[in-house]
Image: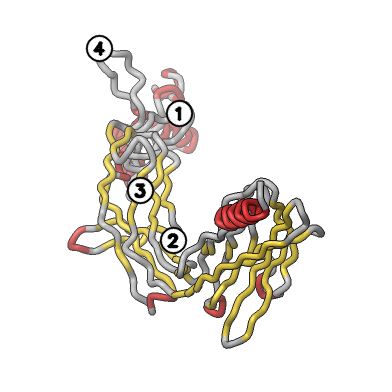
Amino acid sequence: MGEVEWIVVFVMTFISCNALLDLSSVHQVTGTWMGSATVPCTYVPSEGFTQQTLRWSIERDSSIATIFQRDSSGDHILLSKFRGRVSVPKHNPGDASLLIQNLEMLDSGHYTCQIIWRSTDNSLVTKEVTTTVKVVKVAATKPIIRAAEPGLTLPAGASTRLTCEAGGSPPISYRWFRSAPAGTAELLSSGPELAWPSLRPSDSGTYFCEAQNRAGAGAVQRSDAVRLTVTGESRGTAPGEIPLQGEPAASSSLPGEKEMPNAFSTRTRPSPLAPVCVLLYFLQSVSSSLRNCSFLMQKRTSTSNSFYLFLCGFSEVLPGSLRLPTAVQQV
């Protein structure tokens, strides 16, 4: 092979390797304030070329600073304001993309990815690509309600939750409401989730959520309403448990058996006039007893018989089980 042919082969090989080592990226990346963004930088690994150095830098206000550098000694974050917020994949050959988390407005700028490879003959190949990053504040979008499986119709006693999701710059605050009569709404809770550990029929209703963030200048976004339906009866009362107000006591009758009245399963409240009624009943009984014993007052006035007169009146108002013996009552 002549000298000219060797030169042609060398040039073609060099061009081919350089084509394989070209860096791929995009012209611009838009990130959401307080969110995250990935600035792409990829290439196709080529046999005979080893990555020696990876460097990410930022240009802002006519000044350039190195953010990240990877070399034989490891990874280094050289710009303090990016520490703990940037990273580059380690175990994915050909991927040198920069991940930026918790984006700040001052993160906007021109980001340059530069990679240096070393070939088997110790020659160095350097490539770089620049991407513009723009950080913006985005107002909260209209939220969407997502229901956990199996959906919005569940039996009493089941557990479920609703999740409110909205886009926009974090942090996003959420509030849950339940529709009430006359177009009003009841505030239930704050947070992205509304959960029920054990559903009751009374939980059936129409629910919606609202989303808001600082980027939206106080504007509140409301979701479409969803209808939650709870079927069946709530669980029975456990043995020894007092039924909640408004809930009847659980029946203990067998299927097909006629349920007998149970005074202990009925919730009653004592009347505030009960003590007065008892007193009136007592006085009436005493009066009746004195009338029945009036003949004693007419016929017996001696001191020796006054004791029997008292017993006669008192015995009439005692319960049957405590009545005096008949011999004593008959004066």
* Nearer the camera: disc 3 or disc 1: 3
- The location of residue 308, given as percent across then percent down, is 45, 31
Tag 4: amino acid: Gly
- The residue beneath circle 2 is 190
Tag 2: amino acid: Ser
Mark 2 vs 4: CB contact within 8 A: no
- The residue beneath circle 1 is 238
Residue 299 in view here:
no
Circle 4 sits in a helix, a strand or a loop, which is it? Answer: loop
Q: How far apart are labels 3 and 4 at the CA level?
A: 43 Å
**How packed is label 2: few (under 14 Cα within 10 Å), some, or many (20 or more)?**
some
Name the image quarter holding residue 164: bottom left
Q: How far apart are labels 3 and 1 at the CA level?
A: 34 Å
- The residue beneath circle 3 is 146
* Nearer the camera: disc 3 or disc 2: 3
Q: How far apart are labels 2 and 4 at the CA level?
A: 48 Å
Q: Which mark is residue 256?
A: 4
Tag 3: amino acid: Arg
Name the image quarter holding residue 15: bottom right
